Amino acid sequence: MAYISPMLTNIVNAVKKASVNLGRDFSEIERLQNSVKGSLDFTKVAFDKIEKGLKIELSKTVPQIPVVTINEKTPKEGMFLSVSGIEGLANFAHGNPEFAISCALMNGSVVLCGVIYNPARDELFFAEKGKGAFKEGFRSHERLRVASKQELEGALVAVKPSMNDATLSAKIINNAVALCHDVRVSGCVALDLAYVAAGKLDAIIAPESSLASIAAGVLLVKEAGGMALDMAQKDTRTEDLPTVFNSGNLMAVSFNLSQKIAKILK
């Protein structure tokens, strides 16, 4: 049975409460698809609204902890909540349900607990340091475990393209296609990380990712038995999470594939 601390319970409740309007906004997006400008303008309003809503709800339930959104400066030390209001914003703007709210309670570079919630599908994933990773269920919560693939050739790998280096993106995708079973580009790194933790994906390579986008998902992967690595690190047998969070160049992978995933970058 999942252990959910009072702190994590408060964060989950705040995220769900703030997400009610986001679910309504997503339903409205479909009606606006025949107007590109209208859809994009509406998306900006929805993004601003969910960020404000999350700050309000989280401040009510955990008033002693500052809330830092994706475009705000991250504190170097102390406890704070790192929040991405709509992770997978382009998907949301086009009526694609691959988006999520991502929220992580941090103490410096240590993730204490994390929540990823997709209101379009009512899917909620959560983890607490040392307590395991879970998907919320109606009567009981499902314990998450990373997949047990032994070789890249059988692996399903997600890729988040670089926004600043098309050559790097092409290299990663082409190599992954050549070495792995298949590749997915979902446009939502937070959900990809949750799916790695759940064993639905074997790995994700995500250059140039923000802390708010990946912190909760990294904890999910680690608590499900996987690893979070920096794309540039030489020794893939160990983790260096401060480097991962500082660079944003993430590889999250099952333990069995941790020493093979770097082949995709070569």
Image (spheres, grey):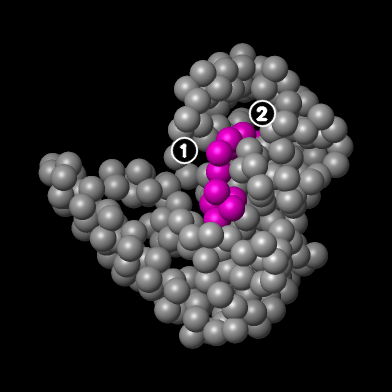
Q: Is residue 100 left or right of residue 199?
A: left
Say if 251 sits above or below 62 in the image.
above
Q: Is residue 145 visible?
A: no
Q: Position of residue 262 (x, y in %)?
A: 73, 26
Mark before the other along the chain sequence, 1 or 2: 2
Residue 264's quadrant in the figure?
top right
Q: What amino acid type should be assigned to the residue bearing mark 1?
A: Ser
Q: What amino acid type should be assigned to the residue bearing mark 2?
A: Ala
- The residue labelled by disc 1 is 186
Which mark is nearer the camera, 1 or 2?
A: 1
Q: Secondary structure at mark 2?
A: loop
Determine if the magenta segment contains residue 204: yes
- Checking the image for residue 155, the label placed there is 2
Circles 1 and 2: CB distance less than 8 Å? Answer: no
Residue in the foreground of this view, choosing between 185 and 166? 166
| Image quarter (top left, top right, bottom left or bottom right) of the N terminus | bottom right
Between the residue at mark 1 and the residue at mark 2, the CA separation in whole angstroms equals 16 Å
Say if 237 sits above or below 26 in the image.
above
Q: Position of residue 50 (x, y in %)?
A: 37, 66
Q: Secondary structure at mark 1?
A: loop
Residue drawn at (38%, 73%) of the image: 53
| Image quarter (top left, top right, bottom left or bottom right) of the C terminus | top right
Q: Position of residue 56 (x, y in %)?
A: 42, 79
Q: Is residue 76 visible?
A: yes
Tell me if mark 1 has few (under 14), some (14-19) or many (20+) residues whose alpha carbon lies within 10 angstroms of its own: some
Determine if the magenta segment contains residue 181: no
Range of magenta residues: 202-214
